Amino acid sequence: MESFGAYTSRTNGTAVVSVRGDVDLYTAPHLWETIDEAITDVPHELVVDLTGVRFVDSTGLSVLVRAQKRLRPVEGTVVVRGANERVSMTLEVTKLNTVLTVER
């Protein structure tokens, strides 16, 4: 199992949080801390790159929803990028693909 990590970079004024490992009950708080810091600095667009993620549970999904709620008042967006088939299916089953912008 790959260890969890979440890192922020900036691209053309957009905050990009790159994630690797599983996002679950134990790692979701670290992901939220990283996202929270990223959207404090760049409040209008957040890209969450899940290319290195194999699995996301409900606590991980709640972090994405929380980010979207935080950005909504400033008309910001959350883009989920690079989700594998398993994570993409989870986003579809939970209908989060209708709330978040999902790019494969």
Image (cartoon, rainbow, N blue to C red):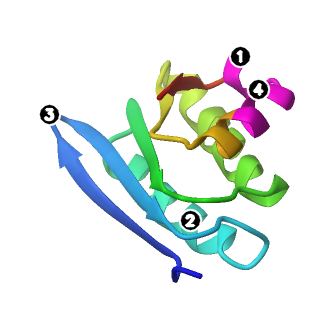
Q: Secondary structure at mark 3?
A: loop
Q: Position of residue 41 (x, y in %)?
A: 32, 50
Label 3 belongs to which residue?
12
Residue depicted at 83% across the width and 53% down the height: 58
Residue depicted at 39% across the width and 53% down the height: 17
Q: Secondary structure at mark 4?
A: helix
Residue depicted at 74% across the width and 68% down the height: 24
Q: Secondary structure at mark 1?
A: helix
Give the class, few, some or many, for how many residues have Cα within 10 Å of label 2's Cα (few <14, many ≥20).
Answer: many
Distance in Å between CA atoms under marks 4 and 2: 21 Å
Q: Secondary structure at mark 2?
A: helix
Query: Which numbered tag is attached to residue 37?
Result: none
Dot placed on the residue nearer the N-terminal end, 2 or 1: 2
Distance in Å between CA atoms under marks 2 and 1: 22 Å
Dot placed on the residue nearer the N-terminal end, 2 or 3: 3
Identify which residue, 86 or 40, lies in the foreground: 86
Query: Which region is colored magenta?
Result: 89-98
